Amino acid sequence: MPPSDARLTLEAEALPLMEVIFSVARRMVGDAARAEDLVQETYLRAFRFSDQYTRNTNCKAWLLTILRSVCIDSTRQLQSRGGSHEQLPGDIRAPLEQLEAVNHTHFLNALDLMVDDDIRSAMLGLPELYREAFVIVVIGELPYKDAAAILQVQEGTVKSRVFRACQMLKGRLWNYAVERRIAPKNGTSG
């Protein structure tokens, strides 16, 4: 049976967004393999319910709403099973594999190969409430209004959470900036 018009429309709009959706998932969970699984499940659900998508609306916001739901479901499943298996560190790959990853993925995905562990840890160390809003607005590049719809909160709440996430990141990364001479030693992180 050929795909429906709704499915073809969704494919045309959703598939080009896959890298952005993966990038958001990666930063929400901190693990590339788990993020790939979440993105796969997100797209499976999206295509399963393609008749619910309205053509030429904000497909990215719709997919991020599904991703959030998938992430919540996945986290609950992991918790009920007693946690997850530890993944091998990303830097265990050979240099050639790292170079191929840089050449074949979106900048934000390649950034994971270059970003220092301090930065990655600071982002993953944010409370989920703030990290989720920060990632959707900053990494997902969605307006506050769309992020509010995804998170099912008021727009002002999203703005507040993103601001607080930025403040927490600034506080956590101040020493990192001083050590790398990006910020003066006598400055303050507040």
Image (cartoon, rainbow, N blue to C red):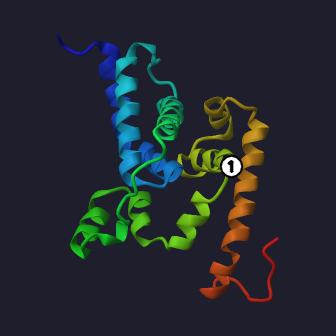
What is the total number of numbered labels drawn onto the structure image? Answer: 1
Q: Residue at x 29, y 63 (%)?
A: 101
Q: In the image shown, does 11 or 48 lie closer to the viewer?
A: 48
Quadrant location, the C terminus: bottom right
Q: Is 162 on the left-hand or right-hand side of 98?
A: right
Q: Name the residue at 32% across, 28% down.
A: 11
Is 47 situated left or right of 125 in this image?
Answer: left
Whether residue 111 can be seen here: yes
Quick check: 68 left or right of 23? right
Out of 35 and 144, give the one closest to the viewer: 35
Q: Whole-percent x and y of residue 3?
A: 24, 16
Which of these two is toward me, 153 or 70?
A: 70
Q: Check the picture and name the quadrant holding the N terminus.
A: top left
Q: Amino acid at mark 1?
A: Tyr
Q: Which residue is mark 1?
A: 130
Q: Quadrant of residue 174?
A: bottom right
Indicate the secondary structure of the residue bearing disc 1.
helix
Would you place residue 88 above or below residue 157 in this image? below
Crowdedness near tag 1: few (<14), some (14–19) or many (≥20) residues, C-alpha within 10 Å:
some
Vertical order, 33 against 71 (above or below): below
Farthest residue, direction top = 1
- Is residue 60 visible in the rendered image? The answer is no
**Residue 78 appears at what percent x and percent y?**
47, 40
Name of the residue lying farthest toward the left: 1
Residue 59, image x, y percentages: 47, 30
Q: Quadrant of residue 121?
A: bottom right
Residue at the image position 46 percent from the left and 24 percent from the top: 56
At 64% across and 80% down in the image, what residue appears? 177
In x, y percent, where is residue 173?
Answer: 66, 72
